[in-house]
Image: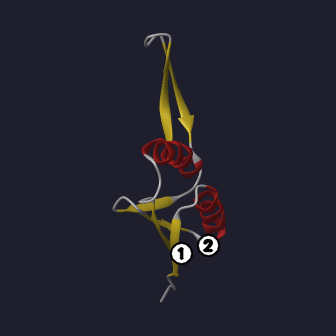
Amino acid sequence: MKLVCYSLKHLMPVQKTKFQRELYGFKDISNHGKYVYRRKGLMSSIKHKTIFFTGLLVDDANAEDVIVLLKKHKAAIHVTDLKKH
């Protein structure tokens, strides 16, 4: 397991929203509510645990996908390896 912490302080609000949508997904409402779609994000397909707002607990196999997404959006990243005892 890896604990991935990130910071988005330096990003503009539009960039933060784009990142959150890509990470967690969002509800897309079209034609004044006539159509509603659930757009999946990266975390929709990954088993994870959210720690506060800016921390994610993910498996080692999926950690690299999360880190790549964070680097794409220029987030400040800190990764800690949690060993099983």
Res. 34 mark: none
CB of mark 2 within 8 Å of CB of mark 1?
Answer: yes
Under circle 1, the secondary element is: loop
Rendered residue at 45%/59% (across/down)? 10
The first of marks 2 and 1 along the sequence is: 1
Task: Find residue 44 and report its horizontal and vertical position in percent.
Answer: 55, 47
Rendered residue at 56%/45% (across/down)? 22
Outermost residue on the left side: it is 52
Task: Find residue 53 and report its horizontal and vertical position in percent.
Answer: 36, 58
Q: How is the image coloured?
A: secondary structure
**Mark 1 nearby-residue class (10 Å; few <14, some 14–19, many ≥20):** some
Exactly how many numbered labels are in the figure? Answer: 2
20 and 36: which one is in front?
20
51 and 15: which one is in front?
15
Rendered residue at 56%/34% (across/down)? 39
Say above or below: 10 vs 2. Answer: above
Res. 1 mark: 1
Say above or below: 38 vs 30. Answer: below
**Mark 2 nearby-residue class (10 Å; few <14, some 14–19, many ≥20):** few
Residue pointed to by mark 2: 60
Say above or below: 16 vs 76. Answer: above
Rendered residue at 54%/49% (across/down)? 23
57 and 13: which one is in front?
13
Q: As shown in the figure, which amino acid type bears the numbered disc 1?
A: Met
Quarter of image, res 63: bottom right
Q: As shown in the figure, which amino acid type bears the numbered disc 2?
A: Asp
Q: CA distance from mark 2 to mark 1?
A: 5 Å
Say above or below: 59 vs 72. Answer: below
Under circle 2, the secondary element is: helix
Task: Find residue 7 and report its horizontal and vertical position in percent.
Answer: 44, 64
